[in-house]
Image (tube, coloured by chain):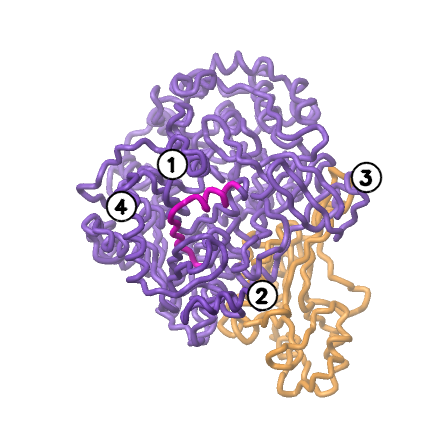
Chain colours: A purple, B orange
């Protein structure tokens, strides 16, 4: 429970009848309601998880009106009917007494933690009044909108567009954006990895055994444990994936790009690259080959601390398994500001191995439209795109588009952290309001003090969330969203090697006075006078329209929760193409070699894979060809500070969920015994880490599982606002140590910095 | 024929993610502050870069020669027909002899029922419905296998016959029915 001095309690109590300071019960929280049994909406409901952004297919069963047992949905084969700790604890969020179930209005100073419950009507009116006034005085573009990605952001950004602001952001630039943009620059689209069929996998710190993505985690284990694949991991820390690997190479932080380029060098100089593949599909190989001439393993050794002989050996080993071998392009960035080059260099190895559209390689998603075209018949229904006529076209430029090099970013969620410079220094113009949905920049964006300053400068802040998150604590208005177990949502595309759809459905009746965010922003639009741009009645009418009015198929989808169509197809894999052609008599004719090789096209300007790109060169001069550029990530007398994911928490979102907080509420700082010894630090000692922007106190975890020049902490801990009772003040707040530094071209927020370490 | 339920924990496949821990808690309504099951990630052991973690499942070992059953003065702790070490909470007087006697330290007093408690392979909940225990059903990497070792065709029999396995503290003669497939890292090859 929170400790409060009597003075601030009295101050809060004096502010009005409906208000109270943070005593044992938060106003507007579930604790303020009578505890009633859960009302189940079916014996077992198939739905979609939301404890992280992977959104795994789940099944949920209500037990005795008290508990929900959540497992995976077996209809989704690659997910195996499994669920992780976070997914299994979803019901604990549902019934957390600290969850917010009434709209709240700030009544004290920003961040003072004084809230008054208001009705939805009042909340909408306040929002409409403030936002419309700001729009009138300063323009709609002075309101920034940011949201978690997925079905939520679809509705929320529709609201932003209807309002007239171009400034919409997802967490892309704080997490997975770089590999998506690197992939689009080279292949014109996102790629997927066929881990389970790979015989050799190189992994640059993509910790799939802690940052669990159920289908990929299972596929990696399947490849390793059932099919004997070799896994090589380059990572500064001995993570779980490093433990499970055949080889762990403790690489110097931020230098992965040098290894990737040196592997490319060996593949080309040893003549191990797939020349036929390159001739047919690749543009710009010669420029690339000329550039990587310099990047020998001997050149990479002093940069990376990895022996040249090892790099050479690994390059030859993976080439021997090609094309059924891959280099994992990772997930959460950003190890270095040279993120664009790093992710492109990784993709380049895959191209040289010729693994595209082969088993155990990388492949393009096969959505219904593409798949049906190949099959020559309608195997899967296509999902109708619901568009609205008469949407306003914003005249203002996005705040992250004044520099041409960032051309690719806006389609991928924008440069989220550009909100800070705009709010604080009017660059390129000022922001007056910030509307957020299920995003927690106080944790996930770099330089917490700067985020706080930017928030304080805003005239109006609205946050839609399930908790008073560290960010929501500084809002003027909090809109309580229902948990995912209480929401129906749009049908989502989950296609992989063949088309698949799934849908989120309500498992229990809504507890308290919460609403799904699609409804919140539809109703807010009504209050703001733009409700005409939200012509759908409810979620069911949308789902019905998405499935082109096929009631039967919608019913089937809701029963099963996940529908998969056809069989897996990789255009260059003979066995899969053969099985496909046998299944569909009207299928497109294959090439002489029994594959669809000649049908493989890329959505790039040349229609080929652009290993070097004139398009990239045109908006980012000097970046057309992948090149190594040294980066200074720390001062000589500092240690590298790196972070990562843990299996029981999701970044800035789950640290207050009781069951998960009980499993882990603190993040000890990993310190090498030699480094710790010099400072007289032992496990459990209080320590202080200080960077150029902030300082954090935490506890030490002395372990040989980290480089001597590096310290590590799991991210998402150390919340500093009192509302997040179980998480506050526990552990190291990573965002408070990372400086606000943006990577070229991809606009990613940098996640490696230098720190000084001391015993407290 | 009576069943001989056993569980096998493959430490090569286990990633210490605690999905089992949470699922057990949810299915069996285990109160806050006590636990029937956790996996401890211990280490790393060895010299860098040849390090390895140990993934140690901590839960009732379902001993065939169970000290908790031997010491229980009221018969609250007993073997059911299929050999599962079970607790009759109506007979439990809360003397905590069993908690003290358990060499694996996995028995606890349930703060709600005030009786001794521990893992019983989900026999009242999932097993009764013909399902695998909660931990087995959610395990992301298929590290857990459960079944009847008296059935020669069961998955568990096949695994026990083809993989090297060990039991925790087997020198005590407790004969645990939790078998562990040791990690290949750290020297033991299976």
Highlighted magenta segment, given as a residue range: A450-466
**In the structure shown, which secondary structural element does the residue marked by tag 1 occupy?**
loop
Q: Which residue is mark 4?
A: A383
The answer for how far apart the CA atoms under marks 4 and 2 are is 53 Å
Q: Residue at x 57, y 53 (%)?
A: A720
Do badges 1 and 4 share one subunit? yes
Do badges 2 and 3 share one subunit? yes
Q: Which residue is mark 3?
A: A678
Q: Earlier in the sequence, mark 3 or mark 4?
A: 4
Q: Which residue is mark 1?
A: A430
The answer for how far apart the CA atoms under marks 1 and 3 are is 48 Å
Q: Which residue is mark 2?
A: A4
Q: Nearer the viewer, mark 1 or mark 4?
A: 1
Q: Earlier in the sequence, mark 1 or mark 4?
A: 4
Q: Chain of mark 4?
A: A
Q: Nearer the viewer, mark 1 or mark 3?
A: 1
Task: Find out whether residue A115 is within the magenta segment.
Answer: no
Q: In the depicted view, which residue is nearer to us: B133 or A666?
A: A666
Task: Find out whether residue A459 is within the magenta segment.
Answer: yes
């Amino acid at each position: 429970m929170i400790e409060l001095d009597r003075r601030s309690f009295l101050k809060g109590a004096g502010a009005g009848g409906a208000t109270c300071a943070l005593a044992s019960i938060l106003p507007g929280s579930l604790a303020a309601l009578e505890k009633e049994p859960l009302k189940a909406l079916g014996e077992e409901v198939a739905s979609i998880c939301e404890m992280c952004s992977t959104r795994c297919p789940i099944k949920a069963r209500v037990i005795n009106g008290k508990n929900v047992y959540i497992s995976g949905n077996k209809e989704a084969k690659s997910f195996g009917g499994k669920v992780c700790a976070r997914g299994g604890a979803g019901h604990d969020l549902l019934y957390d007494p600290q969850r917010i179930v009434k709209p709240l209005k700030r009544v004290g100073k920003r961040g003072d933690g004084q809230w008054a419950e208001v009705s939805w009507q009042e909340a909408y009116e306040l929002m409409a009044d403030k936002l419309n006034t700001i729009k009138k005085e300063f323009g709609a573009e002075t309101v920034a909108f940011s949201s978690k990605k997925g079905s939520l952001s679809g509705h929320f950004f529709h609201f932003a567009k209807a309002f007239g602001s171009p400034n919409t952001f997802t967490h892309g630039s704080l997490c997975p954006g770089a590999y998506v943009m690197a992939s689009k620059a080279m292949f014109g689209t996102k790629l997927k990895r066929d881990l389970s069929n790979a015989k050799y996998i190189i992994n640059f710190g993509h910790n799939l055994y802690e940052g669990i993505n159920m289908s990929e985690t299972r596929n990696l284990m399947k490849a390793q444990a059932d099919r004997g694949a070799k896994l090589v991991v380059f990572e500064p820390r001995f993570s779980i994936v490093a433990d499970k690997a055949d080889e762990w190479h403790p690489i110097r932080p931020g230098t992965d790009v040098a290894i990737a380029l040196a592997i490319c060098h060996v593949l080309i100089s040893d003549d191990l690259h797939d020349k036929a593949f390159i001739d047919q599909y690749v543009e710009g190989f010669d420029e690339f080959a000329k550039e990587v001439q310099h990047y020998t393993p001997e050149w990479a050794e002093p940069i990376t601390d990895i022996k040249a002989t090892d790099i050479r050996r690994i390059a030859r080993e993976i080439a021997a398994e090609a094309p059924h071998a891959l280099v994992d392009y990772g997930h959460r960035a950003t190890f270095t500001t040279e993120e664009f080059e790093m992710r492109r260099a990784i993709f380049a190895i895959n191209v040289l191995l010729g693994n595209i559209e082969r088993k155990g390689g990388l492949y393009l998603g096969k959505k219904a439209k593409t798949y049906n075209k190949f099959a020559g018949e309608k195997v899967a229904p296509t999902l109708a795109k619901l568009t609205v006529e008469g949407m306003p076209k914003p005249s203002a430029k996005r705040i992250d588009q004044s520099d041409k090099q960032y051309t690719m970013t806006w389609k991928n969620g924008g440069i989220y952290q550009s909100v800070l410079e705009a709010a604080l220094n009017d660059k390129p113009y000022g922001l007056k309001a910030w509307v957020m949905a299920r995003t927690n920049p106080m944790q996930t964006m770099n330089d917490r003090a700067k985020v706080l300053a930017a928030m304080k400068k805003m005239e109006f802040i609205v946050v839609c969330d399930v908790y008073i998150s560290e960010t929501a604590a500084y809002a003027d208005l909090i809109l309580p969203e229902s948990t995912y177990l209480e929401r129906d949502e749009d049908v989502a595309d989950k296609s992989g090697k063949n088309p698949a759809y799934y849908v989120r459905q309500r498992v229990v009746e809504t507890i308290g006075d919460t609403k799904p965010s699609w409804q919140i922003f539809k109703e807010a639009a009504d209050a703001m006078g733009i409700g005409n741009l939200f012509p759908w009645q409810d979620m069911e009418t949308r789902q019905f329209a998405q499935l082109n009015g096929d009631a039967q198929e919608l019913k089937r989808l809701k029963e099963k929760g996940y529908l998969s169509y056809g069989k897996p197809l990789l255009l260059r894999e003979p066995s899969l193409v053969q099985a496909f052609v046998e299944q569909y008599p009207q299928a497109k004719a294959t090439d002489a070699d029994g594959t669809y090789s000649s049908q493989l096209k890329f959505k790039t300007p040349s229609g080929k894979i652009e290993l070097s790109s004139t398009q990239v060169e045109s908006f980012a001069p000097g970046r057309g060809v992948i090149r190594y550029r040294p980066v200074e990530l720390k001062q000589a007398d500092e240690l590298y500070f790196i972070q990562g994911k843990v299996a029981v928490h999701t970044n800035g979102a789950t640290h207050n969920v009781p069951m998960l907080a009980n499993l882990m509420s603190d993040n000890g700082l990993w310190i090498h015994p030699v480094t710790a010894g010099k400072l007289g630090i032992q496990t459990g000692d209080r320590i202080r880490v200080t960077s150029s922007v902030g300082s954090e106190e935490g506890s030490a975890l002395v372990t040989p599982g980290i480089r001597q020049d590096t310290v590590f902490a799991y991210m998402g801990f150390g919340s500093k606002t009192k509302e997040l009772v179980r998480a506050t003040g526990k552990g190291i707040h990573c965002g408070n140590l990372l400086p606000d530094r943006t990577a070229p071209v991809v606009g990613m927020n940098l996640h490696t910095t230098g720190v000084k370490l001391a015993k407290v | 024929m009576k069943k001989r339920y056993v569980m096998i924990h493959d430490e090569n496949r286990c990633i210490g993610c605690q999905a089992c821990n949470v699922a057990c808690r949810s299915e069996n309504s285990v109160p806050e502050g006590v636990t029937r099951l956790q996996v401890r990630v211990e280490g790393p052991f060895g010299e860098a870069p040849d390090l390895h973690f140990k993934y140690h499942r901590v839960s009732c070992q379902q001993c065939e020669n169970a000290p908790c059953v031997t010491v229980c003065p009221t018969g609250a702790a007993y073997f059911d027909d299929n050999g599962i070490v079970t607790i009759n909470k109506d007979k439990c007087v809360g003397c905590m002899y069993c908690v003290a006697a358990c060499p694996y330290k996995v028995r606890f007093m349930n703060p709600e029922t005030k009786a001794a408690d521990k893992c019983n392979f989900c026999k009242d909940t999932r097993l009764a419905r013909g399902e695998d225990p909660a931990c087995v059903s959610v395990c992301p990497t298929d590290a857990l296998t459960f079944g009847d070792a008296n059935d020669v065709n069961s998955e568990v029999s096949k695994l026990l016959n083809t993989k090297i396995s060990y039991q925790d503290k087997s020198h005590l003669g407790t004969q645990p029915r939790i078998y562990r497939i040791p990690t290949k890292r750290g020297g033991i090859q299976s």
